[in-house]
Image (cartoon, helix red, strand yellow):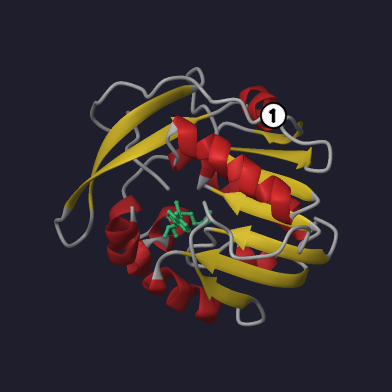
Amino acid sequence: MREYYDRRAREYDDWYRGTGLFAGRSRPGWDEELAALVRLVAGLSPTRVLDVACGSGYLTRHLRGEVVGLDQSTAMLRAARGQAPSARLVRGDGLALPFPDRAFGRVFVAHFYGHLAPGEGAAFLREARAVGGELVLVDAGPRGGPPRDEWQDRVLKDGSPHRVFKRFFTGASLADEAGGRVLHDGYWFVAVAAELTRGPSGGPPGPLGAVGPAPQGGWGD
Ligand SMILES: C[S@@+](CC[C@H](N)C(=O)[O-])C[C@H]1O[C@@H](n2cnc3c(N)ncnc32)[C@H](O)[C@@H]1O
């Protein structure tokens, strides 16, 4: 994933903004639901918060409190520096968080968990449980289908092809996996919160989905 997101950093926010490769896409309700997601993120109580896989900082900038953004990609962190200048940014591995236990009041993670293979997802929940008191997970909504996993073939603006593992959730399926409660149960996005002191189930999600082309409507995060 590192090379893919390094290459994609400059064009990543096109996905949010409906520009660039995403300019021609029909995404009914996208703007309204994204605005609702931003309101949800901005409405989280201020605390010491770790944004794992913060990417370009598009959502990081709305988090309140003492914000630390972590990402593996230098190019993404460069973009985040511009968009979320008050956050402390750290280059690191979200699956081996370089922080002491209970260092944060909240671990926030958006559009990262759903890219993790089953064993990695469980490992991430263990890492998050160690460093934070609460986990807020944002990921892809079901987009008219059932919860599912798939491999997507994606092509960036520079023409480079990439194969990306991607999962789609309902609020209930993500809450069940993370051991939490639903905060947002939309078409494009879902969000759940889990008290990490009680601990998520941490059980592995289902098997990897079939290899196939990007779904109708194309790929996203
Ligand atoms: C789909 S983007 C999500 C960015 C941002 N959280 C958002 O919702 O807009 C996935 C991000 O995960 C980062 N990433 C992938 N694997 C990672 C890892 N093992 N550790 C830290 N960051 C990782 C990528 O560099 C990329 O910025």
Q: How many marks?
A: 1
The furthest residue to the left: 159
The image shows residue 21, relative to residue 140, as above or below, that is below
Q: Is residue 194 visible?
A: yes
Residue at horizontal 77%, vertical 67%?
A: 64
Residue under the point 55% across and 41% down: 123
Side of 158 relative to 84 (left or right): left
The residue singled out by tag 1 in the image is 175
Q: What residue do we see at 61% from left, 51% from top?
A: 109
The image quadrant of residue 13 is bottom left
Which kind of residue does numbered mark 1 sit on? Ala
Q: Is residue 55 above or below residue 134?
A: below
The kind of secondary structure element at disc 1 is helix
The spot of residue 136 in percent (x, y) is 71, 46
Residue 117 locus on image (x, y percent): 42, 35
Of 114 and 31, nearer the camera is: 114
Q: Residue 186: x, y in percent?
A: 63, 33
- The answer to whether residue 71 is above or below residue 121 is below
Q: Is residue 142 left or right of residue 61?
A: left
Q: Is residue 59 left or right of residue 112?
A: right
Q: Would you say the beta carbon of the disc 1 residue lies within 8 angstroms of ligand 1?
A: no
